[in-house]
Image: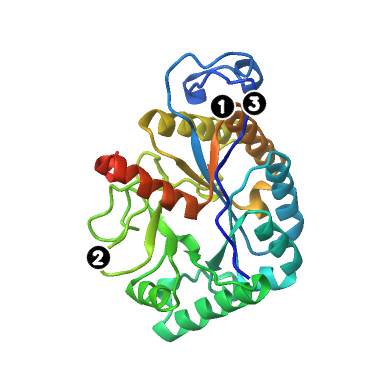
């Protein structure tokens, strides 16, 4: 069976809050939800990625919050998780969620193993196994992939191309995890040597480096500070006219109570601002449309 990308659904509420940067000492969420948007910022847009490979209970807790708000996102899973939860993953795909492959190598005895540490054959076996499992569950071709820790190499790219993936989410803006010449790109792009779309993850400058905007790289932040960063980055990207990409791992965000509260408050804040929620595939489509109207949309920040 075939699946069509769902239409972007803006969340409609009568209340539109004042956008503010919490890191600058703005009032808590409950206070500024009573205000009104006074600036002429554009429509906020968010691409949420939910990546899970181990905790179905935490996964359900996070997904329940998204479903209750009619928010569609990109779900990234590996072969084991999809095999153990196929009915649920298939149900979510039917409801308009985008399902992508998660290429995460096994880590024996807790050792760190990323894609670039593997041989070509080992990478091909892993990626093929994950894709085959998701294809078998959904009955359709999996066209998106994300590599563990955003780590990959030329072998990975060749395999991804050869297996027919259309979207690769294993890139991070403003870092070396980009195709050559695209370090400053914040929107999806195509390199000259590959057929897939490179989808760069939003990044945040944390002083000495740029970090992918995921919950795990900011695990040392207090929950309130993480919530403040989530809302301020949404405001900042909206002011610049770009969608915000953010990733959550249920096995972390869905288990830590402070992180979960920050996640829920971020969703409420985004919904109250009439945010458009997109999948990664819809982001690529949006980029194509925006670039046709304004070619410099793909320029760096």
Residue 259 visible? The answer is yes
| Among numbered discs 3 and 1, the one appearing first in the sequence | 3
In the rendered image, the vertical position of residue 27 relative to residue 250, given as above or below: above
Whether label 2 touches label 1, CB < 8 Å: no
Quadrant for the N terminus, please.
Answer: bottom right
Residue under pointer 1:
273
Contact, mark 3 vs mark 1 (Cβ under 8 Å): no
Residue 299: x percent and y percent? Answer: 26, 43
First along the sequence among labels 3 and 2: 3
Kind of element beneath mark 1? loop
Structural crowding at the residue carrying mark 3, measured as other residues with C-alpha within 10 Å and reported as few (<14), some (14–19) or many (≥20): few
- Of circles 3 and 1, which is in front? 3
Residue 255 in sight: no
Say left or right for 212 vs 99.
left
Instruction: Say if 32 sits above or below 58 in the image.
Output: above
What residue does disc 2 label? 192
Of callouts 2 and 1, the N-terminal one: 2
Q: Which mark is residue 13?
A: 3
User: Where is residue 4 shown, x and y percent of the image?
Assistant: 57, 59
In front here: 75 or 120? 75
């Amino acid at each position: 069976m075939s699946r069509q990308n769902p239409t972007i659904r803006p969340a409609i509420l009568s209340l539109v809050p004042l956008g503010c940067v919490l890191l600058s000492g703005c009032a808590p969420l409950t206070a500024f939800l009573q205000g009104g948007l006074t600036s002429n910022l554009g429509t906020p847009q968010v691409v949420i990625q939910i990546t899970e490979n181990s905790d179905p209970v935490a996964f359900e807790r996070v997904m329940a919050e998204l479903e209750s708000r009619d928010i569609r996102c990109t779900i990234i899973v590996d072969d084991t998780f999809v095999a153990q939860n196929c009915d649920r993953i298939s149900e979510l795909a039917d409801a308009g969620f985008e399902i992508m492959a998660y290429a995460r190598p096994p880590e024996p005895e807790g050792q760190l193993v990323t894609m670039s540490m593997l041989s070509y054959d080992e990478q091909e076996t892993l990626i093929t196994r994950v894709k085959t499992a998701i294809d078998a569950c959904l009955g359709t071709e999996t066209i998106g992939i994300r590599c563990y820790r955003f780590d990959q190499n030329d072998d990975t790219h060749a395999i991804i191309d050869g297996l027919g993936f259309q979207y690769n989410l294993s890139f991070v803006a403003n870092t070396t995890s980009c195709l050559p010449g695209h370090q400053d790109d914040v929107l999806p792009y195509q390199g000259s040597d590959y057929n897939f779309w490179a989808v760069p993850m939003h990044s945040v400058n944390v002083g000495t480096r740029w970090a992918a905007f995921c919950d795990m790289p900011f695990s040392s932040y207090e929950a309130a500070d993480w919530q403040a960063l989530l809302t301020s980055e949404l405001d900042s990207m909206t002011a610049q006219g770009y969608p915000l990409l953010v990733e959550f791992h249920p096995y972390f965000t869905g288990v830590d109570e402070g992180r979960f509260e920050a996640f829920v408050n971020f969703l409420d804040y985004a919904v109250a601002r009439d945010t458009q929620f997109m999948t990664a595939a819809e982001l690529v489509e949006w980029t194509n449309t925006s670039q046709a109207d304004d070619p410099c949309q793909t320029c760096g920040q």
